[in-house]
């Protein structure tokens, strides 16, 4: 026996494959993501999801019966109901931050060998609430419950980066006072201001230990379902070890770890997050992506649920830009999404923070190049599994191919993309790669 969607109803396996349930959840997501606070009309939902209105009404019935969706009869629109708010509140109420972050901390410590930390903010201080020691030769052993002023280290800087400007001004004044005023106080305030600005730009805060503490650190924010920073996930390690691993690379790791914990806390739920990840210029080319340059005219970002018939010519070409990858130095964009594909420019092994070439060997430079490409793909909600073609340029094709290929195989998994590898006369680098990925 089968239901109207052709699903077998015999046994648990058939029920677990219920397309009706999946469709109903898709409808719920669409209503949650709809930009109009008054709700979405039946026509909006049907057109956005490509469903017949009769099918849509059947899917909406149990959602409205259970209070997950509320139908405004006067406006003929649908929006989230009180039951959705209740379930979200129960989830958040029963969520423990340390439990939510523990697995992520363990993964960071195992992957890097450094000590992974979880820090929260209390007023103008940070408090260390959890830590997992890494397996490195000289692990940093922080003291749980340790308190530091917000202006004092990377955890405080990245939390300040997500708060209002008044908090940053207060932290600068606290740093100025702690340094004793005068020129040293002004230098301390400038250091805080620069660190917070960098954290806002890159999504993580880093300290190489050159200030004399002997410990390098890097932190990224964890935000709650309202987007407010509630904690920081970070790594601490000896200065020499942290430098060899590249603080920028560690920054990318903790930034993704912070996002992972944030997702558990309900941050960025729904499909609208994916659309927001792509930064595009305003219609008419009124501006350029921050820190980049491009001759491509500005494009508006289409609504994530817009049907193909609604997509205009203006939507067909989107500039993709991220501060997590090297910024363009000529008349090109980091990537362009068009025709169902994302096309990246050729990227090399440049550190996105300093702009310098990272590493001297083909192994080191390939690692950095692939990190840069991963950042550009991530800016459009994609990964290496979405890549269908790669073009690789090697300065020394015969000498470096095997070492390059070994790194490449660690980052990409079968089925591998189609690939062309050629020798090329590159300027001051050993490798450059561009990729094409299919849009989801």
Image (cartoon, rainbow, N blue to C red):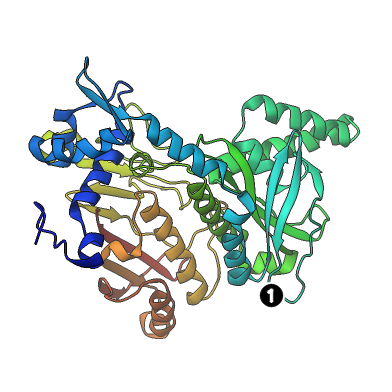
Residue 330: x %, y % from top left: 38, 47
What residue appears at the point 29 percent right and 62 percent down from the top-left corner? 386
What residue appears at the point 53 percent right and 62 percent down from the top-left corner? 357
Residue 17: x %, y % from top left: 22, 61
Q: Residue furthest right?
A: 180
Quarter containing the N terminus: bottom left
Q: Give the residue at mark 1.
A: 135
Circle 1 SS class: loop
Relative to 19, does residue 203 appear above or below in the rendering? above
The quadrant in which residue 284 appears is: top left
What residue appears at the point 32 percent right and 50 percent down from the top-left corner? 335
Residue 291: x %, y % from top left: 46, 40
Relative to 6, does residue 395 appear above or below in the rendering? below
Residue 36: x %, y % from top left: 30, 24
The quadrant in which residue 280 appears is: top left
Relative to 178, does residue 96 appear above or below in the rendering? below
């Amino acid at each position: 026996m089968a239901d109207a969607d052709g699903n077998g109803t015999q046994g648990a396996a058939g029920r677990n494959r219920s397309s009706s349930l999946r469709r109903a959840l898709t409808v719920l997501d669409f209503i949650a993501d709809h930009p109009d606070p008054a709700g979405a009309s039946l026509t909006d939902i049907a057109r956005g999801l490509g469903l017949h209105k009769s099918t849509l009404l059947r899917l909406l019935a149990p959602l409205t019966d259970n209070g997950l969706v509320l139908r405004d009869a006067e406006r003929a629109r649908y929006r989230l109901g009180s039951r959705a708010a209740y379930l979200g509140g129960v989830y958040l109420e029963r969520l423990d931050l340390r439990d939510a972050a523990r697995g992520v901390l363990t993964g960071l410590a195992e992957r890097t060998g450094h000590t992974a930390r979880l820090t929260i903010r209390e007023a103008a201080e940070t408090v260390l609430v959890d830590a997992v020691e890494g397996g490195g030769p000289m692990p940093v052993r922080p003291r749980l419950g340790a308190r530091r002023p917000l202006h004092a280290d990377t955890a405080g800087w990245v939390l300040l980066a997500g708060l209002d400007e008044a908090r940053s001004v207060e932290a600068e004044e606290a740093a100025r006072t702690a340094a004793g005023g005068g020129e040293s106080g002004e230098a301390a305030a400038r250091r805080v201001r620069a660190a917070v600005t960098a954290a806002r730009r890159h999504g993580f805060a880093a300290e190489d230990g050159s200030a004399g503490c002997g410990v390098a650190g890097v932190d990224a924010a964890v935000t709650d379902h309202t987007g407010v920073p509630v904690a920081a996930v970070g790594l601490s390690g000896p200065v020499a070890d942290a430098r060899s691993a590249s603080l920028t690379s560690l920054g990318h790791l903790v930034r993704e770890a912070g996002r992972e914990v944030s997702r558990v806390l309900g941050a960025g739920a729904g499909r609208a997050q994916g659309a927001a990840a792509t930064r595009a210029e305003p219609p008419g080319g009124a501006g350029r992506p921050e820190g980049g340059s491009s001759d491509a005219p500005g494009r508006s970002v289409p609504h994530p649920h817009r049907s193909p018939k609604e997509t205009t010519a203006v939507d067909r070409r989107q500039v993709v830009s991220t501060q997590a990858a090297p910024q363009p130095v000529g008349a090109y964009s980091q990537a362009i999404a068009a025709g169902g594909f994302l096309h990246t420019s050729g990227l090399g092994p440049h550190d996105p923070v300093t702009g310098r070439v990272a590493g001297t060997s083909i192994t080191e430079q390939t690692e950095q190049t692939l990190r840069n490409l991963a950042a550009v793909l991530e800016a459009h909600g994609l990964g290496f599994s979405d890549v269908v073609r790669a073009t690789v340029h090697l300065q020394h094709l015969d000498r470096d191919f095997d070492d390059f290929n070994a790194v490449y195989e660690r980052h990409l998994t079968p089925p591998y993309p189609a690939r062309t590898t050629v020798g090329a006369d590159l300027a001051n680098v050993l490798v450059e790669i561009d990729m094409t990925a299919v849009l989801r």
